[in-house]
Image (cartoon, grey):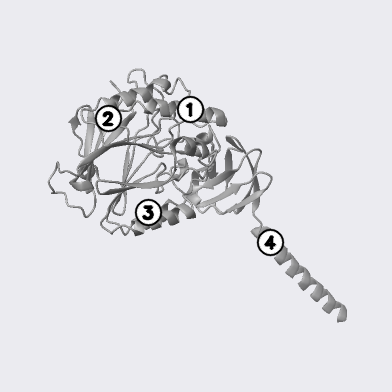
Amino acid sequence: MRAQRRKFVLASALATFAAATGALAVAKPRVVKVVAKRFVFTPATIKLAKGEPVVFELTTQDVFMGMNIPDFGVRSDIVPGKTMKLALTPDKAGTFIFLCDVFCGDGHEGMSGTLVVT
Amino acid sequence: MTIDRRTFLQLAALGGGAVFASSLAGAATGGAAGGDDDFYFVQLSDTHWGFDGPKINPDARGTLPKAIDAVNALPRQPDFVVFTGDLTHTTDNPIERRKRMAEFREIVSRLKVKDVRFMPGEHDASLDHGKAFGEFFGDTHYVFTHKGVTFIALDNVSDPAARIGDEQLAWFAGELSRLPKDARIVVLTHRPLFDLAPQWDWATRDGAQAIDLLMPYRNVTVFYGHIHQENHRMTGHIAHHSAKSLIFPLPAPMSQPKREPVPWDPQAPYRGLGFREVDAEDRGERFELKEHGLGA
């Protein structure tokens, strides 16, 4: 009886742990690394799933920049020497522009990329 | 809100230019024309002196002088001329930046009109926070009055992140607070104050704050550049008019995937380039815009 009770407690604890870690696994966003360098983003095309949470980890190889995704109303500075994080859970499918919104020189106007959300 | 073409664009052939009237909301449109306080000014924009791209503009060094000659040839000279930014094309080299500004200033000095107002664009000011511009052309934001109209130049480019900034917004609020609500106000700026196409960086990050400050004033018109084409929009009762460039045109907002210059057409050189007359009638309560092309 005592052994059975121990088994039940252990099983309950494992179930709770599994549920917790499972929940964490669901909530943990996918990390997408994006590197900025005058006047390109790498990658320039990023594929996402609608409803999938992602975190962009943004770095720059040279000057201060920005990543702006106007259609989703989110942006972040990209500061030299730091890894910046920008969270997004796309709530609509389609093709969307992301761009550098901090003027960085002759070529800035062409510094953009494409989000493809399916 | 896009202005209804029938309402806002009363196009007419007039000396090679196109004319339309911009009546300010709440303003009388009947007053006597030709009064003592009637005047006009010329807006030139986005000259990008120093730009080099033969497929885009093979006459990059000739286009600005051509525009200056065209202004000088106007039958009646304007009261003043304003350049709404991107006087020079950007460069990383501070010596070259100043060389371009010196050359630009020399060419512009050939204008018959000596009252010339300058504003920076991001190409002039964003890489050094307006330092070189200040050395050559003075303040990046300022206010002046002309025949009863208050002109306020706002700088939304010295911050490379396209912000006017809290300090300048406070100055702007202070200047506005001195004016009655029916004051005739013209705002000059480089970038659009509203979100014209943020996907193409055609916006000002805190521009909505400037518009909010203007909303209590009944007679406000904004003239800007940056987008290298005419565009006419309303935010509430405030009219916003962008100007053509004097180096290359850009496509209509979001009309194609990339914001790339419209290539030069040898069959129609200078197409899409030009400048604007702004006639202030009825003591600045009504503006008539006349667009001048540089083409044949």
* Badge 3: residue crowd in 10 Å (few <14, some 14–19, many ≥20): some
x%, y% of residue B137? 44, 37
Q: Is residue B153 visible?
A: no
Q: Nearer the viewer, mark 3 or mark 4?
A: 3
The amino acid at mark 2 is His
Identify the mark nearer the N-term, 3 or 1.
1
Q: Are marks 4 and 2 in contact (CB under 8 Å)?
A: no
Residue annotated with mark 1: B100
Residue extending farthest to the right is: A3
* Badge 2: residue crowd in 10 Å (few <14, some 14–19, many ≥20): many
Identify the mark nearer the N-term, 2 or 3.
3
Residue annotated with mark 2: B292
* Label 2 – label 3 distance at C-alpha: 29 Å
The amino acid at mark 4 is Leu
Chain to which mark 4 belongs: A
* Badge 1: residue crowd in 10 Å (few <14, some 14–19, many ≥20): many
Choose top left, top right, bottom left or bottom right for residue A53: bottom right
Left or right, B95 with respect to B240, comes to right
